[in-house]
Structure formats: C-alpha cells, structure tokens
Amino acid sequence: MSEFFMYIAELFAAPFFVRALIVGTLVSLCSSLLGVSLVLKRYSMIGTGLSNVSFGCVTVAVALNIAPLYISIPVVVASSFLLLRISDNSKIKGDSAIAMISSGAISIGVMAVYLTSGVTNDVCGYMFGSVFSLTQSDMVFSAALSVVVIIMFVIFYNRIFAVTFDENFARATGTNAGRYNAVIALLTASTIVVGMKMMGTLLISSLIIFPALTSMRLFKSFKIVVVCSGFLSVFCFFIGMALTVIFEAPAGASVVIAHIAFFLIFSAVSALKKIRKRSIEINE
Amino acid sequence: MSNNKSHSDVRGNEVQNAKKKQSEKINVIVFASLCVVLLVAVGVVFALTKTGNHSKPLETGDSDKEIINITEKLYVSWINEIYTSTDQYLGRTIKIEGMFAKEVLPQKTYYYVYRVGPGCCGNDGAMCGFEFTSGGEYPQENDWIEVVGTLEVYEENGNKFLTLSNSKITVKQERGLEVVGN
C-alpha cells in the first residue's frame, strides 16, 4: 500500500502531471457547462466544426513557425461568429455552413502540411492531444481563459437558459437572443482553443457533447443536467488520466472512452428505469 | 363539480411533481454511487497494476542537489518537459536509464542513452533520450545503462544542444522497457 502512495507522490512530483490535472479539470468543466446549451440548441456540430478550424490553424502556424495559439484564437473566434451569421442566413442552412467551414479548414491544413515539413510531432500532438506537454505558460493562459469562461457562464446563466429553451420567447420578452448566441459561440470558441492541445483538435468536441448527452439520459432539469455534466466531465477526465498513467494509453482517447462508458451505463440505467416504470403502470 | 375537478388536477400535478422529484433524487443517488464504485475500481486497478520498481522522481538528500529521476512511466513526458522548459532544469542532476548508442563522426563521437518513444503518426518509433559525456570508459552499443549527469547546454554550428555532462555510467543486467508510450 505504501508503494501505491509512493507512486501517487511520484506522479504529483512531476510538474507536467500537475499542470495537466489543473488544465484538464478546468477545460472539462468549461466544455461541459457550454455543452448543455449547445446540445439543446442543436449546435453540437459547431464544436466539431470549430475544432476542425483549429486543426487548420495549427498546421498553418506550425508551417509558419508561429505559436499555434496566436493564429487559433482569432481565427476560431471569427469562425464561430461566421458560423452563427451564416446559420441565421436562410440561404445556407446551419449544417451546410458547418460542413463547408470544417472541410475548408481541413483542406487548408492538409495543404499547409503538404507544402511544408509534413506531419511533424507538433501537428500530431495538436491533432490527438498531448496533455503532458503543456508548458507553464500554456497552463497560465488556459487557466485564465477557463476561469473567464466559467465566470461568464455564471453571469449569463439565466439569459443562456432563456435563449437555449425558447429563442422566440426570449426575443418576445426583450432578450437580445443574437447577442447571447454570440456569447455562447465566443465561449465555445475559447474552450476549443484552450482544450485543443490537451485533448487534440479531433477529440475536443467530444468533451462538449458527451457530458450533456450522458446527463440527459437520467436528468431532465436544466440546472441538474448542467451540474451533473460538470461533475461527470471532470470525473471522466480523472478516469482518462488514470488509464493514461496505468496503461500508457493516449490521454485524449482515454478520456473519450471514459465518456463513452458512462454514456452506455447511463443509457442502460435509463432504459431499466423505463422498463420498471412500464411494468408498474401495467400492474396498476 | 368543476372546483372538485380542478382540485383533483392540482393534487394530480402535485403527486406527479413529487414523483418527478423523487425520481431525480434516485437518479442523483444512482449517479453518485456509480461514481464512487468507479473511483474505487480505478483505485484498485491503479494499485494492482503498479509495479514495484519505482523510485522517487526527485531523490532528496540535500535539497539543493535533488536528483531528477526519469521514471519508466511518463518517460517521454519527462524528457519532453526537460527539453521544453530547459531553463528550469539546467545545472540539475538527472538520472536516466536506457539503451546505449554512439554516433561516430570524423570530428567528434556522440554518446546517447535512449529508449524508443512514439513517433508521428502510429508506431514509427523515435529515439527519445539524452546525449551524454563521461570521463571514463563507454559501454558496448545496446547495453542497458544508467546515466547520472548534470544537464548542460552547448552550441554547435549555431544550434543549441542538451547534454548530460560528467556522467556516471552503470551497466545494468536487468533491462527495462525499450519501447515506451508516454
């Protein structure tokens, strides 16, 4: 047993492990909070679209030998507004806009890779995530941005709730739905940028979608779903980290597999409850 | 009559709400129990799979002379950390185990301690370790060695390289993992 605690102490003595835990917890929390609104508004694909855009940004940044965040932040934020604007335009529907922007971004990324150094370790790390390669400055930046996202979510919670459930009603009661949709898009873009190095651009959207969908299997109230999603997301991150350390598995994929496992468990519990409820109704 | 009906509707709604709340409570309990069970399961797996050959990454004897031990698990992450945050580790003593390799060039011979880490993308492994120098004799290629040396930086042809200088080399019979993941 003492060996076990020694091993835990060994892990926590590694500075990169502590940084990974801090950033991972904050990013998991941010993404799960926003995920509920995005899933309910049927904007789940925006997360995937923006993560593809961030892949394009990373490859271009690596090709130009610039820190990826300097290009990713403005481009991903601009893309999120663009996606909302195009989605509002009836000529191009939301799903077409996302498909157009994400495939466009990937093609730019692939071209950048082809024309320059090829798929380097940097690009690979950003594609599939490298949670232990976060530097001190990455951690400070990510923590600051995550705290801003969480504070903004708490401040605008009621408005986001109103816009999520019934946008037309929210507009009728004087809420500027467009502005709050923009807030949601801005927060989503920030979360994706913060999480792309940790989870990878190809996997970050799963952090947004899975916790909300899993929580909705069992809970119906918006507040409880938000709280459960946050808790679940952080918990799955810890399980993913444990799998990474025990089996030397890739961190991003381990976290997503933990989410899939929870989704299946929650779905099974929900199905069992429905069966039980039906049998009680039949007996009555 | 209509009053009775509305009263019964209200009661019906109250009963339904109470049932919903109870159901939510049950869900919260189920969720919390699942989390606890999984947490315990992960802890048990963690404890069972842990091998006994671990040493502290920071061996403290004299606080100013902490030895950074590159452990088998998180081997690549430790090396990545040292290469990306070099300033924090320059002058520190580093202990690392791995295979021995040398590169003989006309002007200089380079000596390395390394393991095979993940490359990009897939299983095309890459050399992961440190160059080192020692005043004594060097071992045979592919020997399993432990190197303890001081991290230093030197410049060659305009580029900066890291090396473990004044290293103490120990050839070990028991080999560790040659291919590492994280």
Image (cartoon, coloured by chain):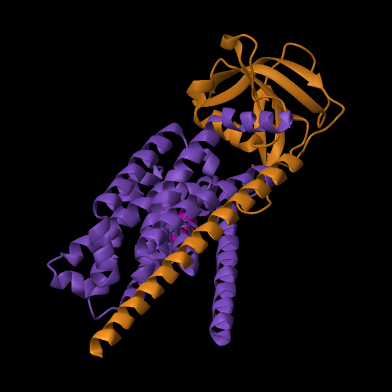
- Counting every numbered tag in the picture gives 0
**Residue B94 placement (x, y as % from top left):** 64, 20
Across and down, in percent, residue B126 comes to 66, 42
Any idea which chain is the orange one in this picture?
B
The residue located at (49%, 69%) in the rendering is: A217
Say if the magenta span includes residue A41: no
Q: Is residue A182 at all visible to an observer of this figure?
A: no
Instruction: Check the image and name the residue furthest to the right.
Output: B173
Q: Percent from the top left, x then y, of residue A196?
A: 44, 51
**Considering the image in quadrants, where does the C terminus of chain B appear?**
top right
**Residue most toward the left?**
A174
Question: Tell me, what hue is chain A?
Answer: purple
The foreground one among A160 and B33 is B33
Position above or below: A259 against A133: below
Q: Is residue A111 shown in magenta?
A: yes
Which contiguous range is marked in magenta?
A: A110-115
In the image, residue B73 above or below residue A269 = above
